[in-house]
Image (cartoon, rainbow, N blue to C red):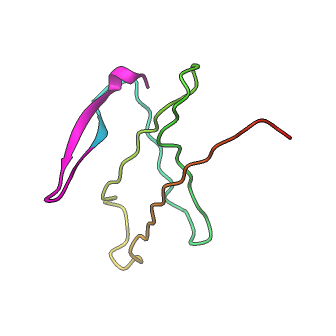
Amino acid sequence: MGQSDFVATDLIYPQRRGEIYSVIFNPEHRWYFFPQMQANEALLLKCYDSAEDGRARFTAHTAFDDPTTATDAPRRESIETRAFVFFGPAN
């Protein structure tokens, strides 16, 4: 996935404006999902990296309604947290 697969999208709220990136269709994209995750498991996504040295800078992610889910299955639970991590020189 390259930078050309992302398009800036405005988020407009009553008190502020923001911006995210949306993903455009590309038949080369490959999407994965984890239908058997348990409550004691986590999935970590790197959504942004400021480094411009060739490593992945963005991770596209989404959600969808899975038509194979049992009607009595427990509801999905999700939490989003944002963190900044800075690495400095080793002492």
Toward the viewer: 15 or 3?
Answer: 15
- Where is the C terminus found, in terms of image quarters? top right
Residue 71 screen position, x and y as percent: 32, 75
Q: Hey, which quadrant is residue 72 in on the image?
A: bottom left
Q: Hey, which quadrant is residue 2 in on the image?
A: top left
- Residue in the image at 58% along x and 25% along y: 55
Residue 56 screen position, x and y as percent: 53, 29
Determine whether, in the image, residue 22 is placed left or right of residue 61: left
Task: Specify the segment rendered in magenta.
Answer: 1-18
- Residue in the image at 13% along x and 59% along y: 14
- Residue in the image at 61% along x and 47% along y: 85
- Where is the N terminus found, in terms of image quarters? top left
In the displayed structure, would residue 36 be above or below residue 77? above
Look at the image and say whether residue 7 sits in the magenta stretch. yes
As drawn, the residue found furthest toward the right would be 91
Q: Hey, which quadrant is residue 70 in on the image?
A: bottom left
In the displayed structure, would residue 3 be above or below residue 66? above
Look at the image and say whether residue 71 sits in the magenta stretch. no
Toward the viewer: 15 or 5?
Answer: 15
As drawn, the residue found furthest toward the front would be 91
In the displayed structure, would residue 68 be above or below residue 2? below
Determine whether, in the image, residue 29 is placed left or right of residue 41: left
